[in-house]
Amino acid sequence: MSISENLESIKAQLPEGVKLVAVSKTKPNEDIMQAYNTGHRVFGENKVQELVAKHEALPKDIEWHMIGHLQRNKVKYIAPFVHLIHGVDSFRLLKAIDKEGRKQKRIMNCLMQFHIAEEETKFGLDMKEAKEMLDSVEYKELAHINIMGVMGMATFTDDEQAVSKEFQCLKAIFNELKTQYFSGKDDFKEISMGMSGDYLLAVKGGSTMVRVGSSIFGGRN
């Protein structure tokens, strides 16, 4: 199957209102353009350098998502153009994003990344840290960030029950934050969860945004 056929087939499986982020990391620009020419505009990268290079080389109506772990000292390179930062896993990072947003005179869209997996290697906040952050005076002073929801990565396992449970956990976190902190905020609505191996489970669990790479572009280059 070609990239465009893969895209069409995945989009056909997704319910209305679920956004597909085509994960183009390590893929050449020609592959991205194949997807672009089918009408797809939303792409995700996990390395700052690669994201910047692709943004410079490719059409300007692409909506770029930063989906990987982001270091504070690298925010400045993507701040002028990035559409959504998925992986805000610390308050320090959020403050760095706000600072760069202020310099660029733009509001930076972010998702709070939560640690929902059994694996220790995944980054992310826990609920206690998130609440301390959201309750703090410092947070209330940030004028150049827009938190639009939550993101999480499930354990890499074939155990669908375990994965579903982790997705339910993220949905519960979203619901609690929505009720307690973002009830009046219409654009706090994103639950970014689900990748090539588990996006259908994620959609069942309430995902509004899936990040799919290999099922569109094939294995890693």
Image (cartoon, helix red, strand yellow):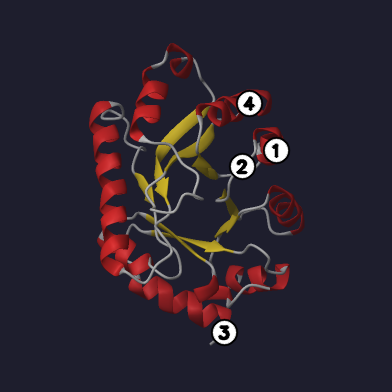
Q: Residue at x 51, y 43 (%)?
A: 87
Q: Secondary structure at mark 1?
A: helix
| Quarter holding residue 163 | bottom left
Query: Which numbered tag is attached to residue 70?
Result: 2
Report the front residue among 59 and 119.
119
Query: Which numbered tag is attached to residue 167?
Result: none
The amino acid at mark 2 is: Leu
| Discs 2, 4 touching: Cβ within 8 Å | no
Q: Secondary structure at mark 2?
A: loop
Q: Residue at x 43, y 12 (%)?
A: 137
The location of residue 149, given as percent across then percent down, is: 38, 40
| Quarter holding residue 125 | top left
Decide: is 201 above or below 128.
below
Q: Earlier in the sequence, mark 2 or mark 4?
A: 2
Q: Secondary structure at mark 3?
A: loop
The location of residue 9, given as percent across then percent down, is: 42, 79
The amino acid at mark 1 is: Lys
The amino acid at mark 4 is: Lys
C-alpha span from label 3 to label 4: 40 Å
C-alpha span from label 1 to label 2: 7 Å
Mark nearest the camera among 1 and 4 is 1
Is residue 74 found left or right of 190 in the rendered image? Answer: right
Query: Which numbered tag is attached to residue 74?
Result: 1
Is residue 43 found left or right of 20 in the rendered image? Answer: right
Say few, some or many: other residues with alpha carbon within 10 Å of mark 3 (under 14 / 14 to 19 / 20 or more).
Answer: few
Query: Which residue was labeled with disc 4?
Result: 105
The amino acid at mark 3 is: Ser
C-alpha span from label 1 to label 4: 18 Å
Mark nearest the camera among 3 and 4 is 3
Can the viewer see residue 80 in this picture? no
C-alpha span from label 2 to label 4: 20 Å
Say few, some or many: other residues with alpha carbon within 10 Å of mark 2 (under 14 / 14 to 19 / 20 or more).
Answer: some
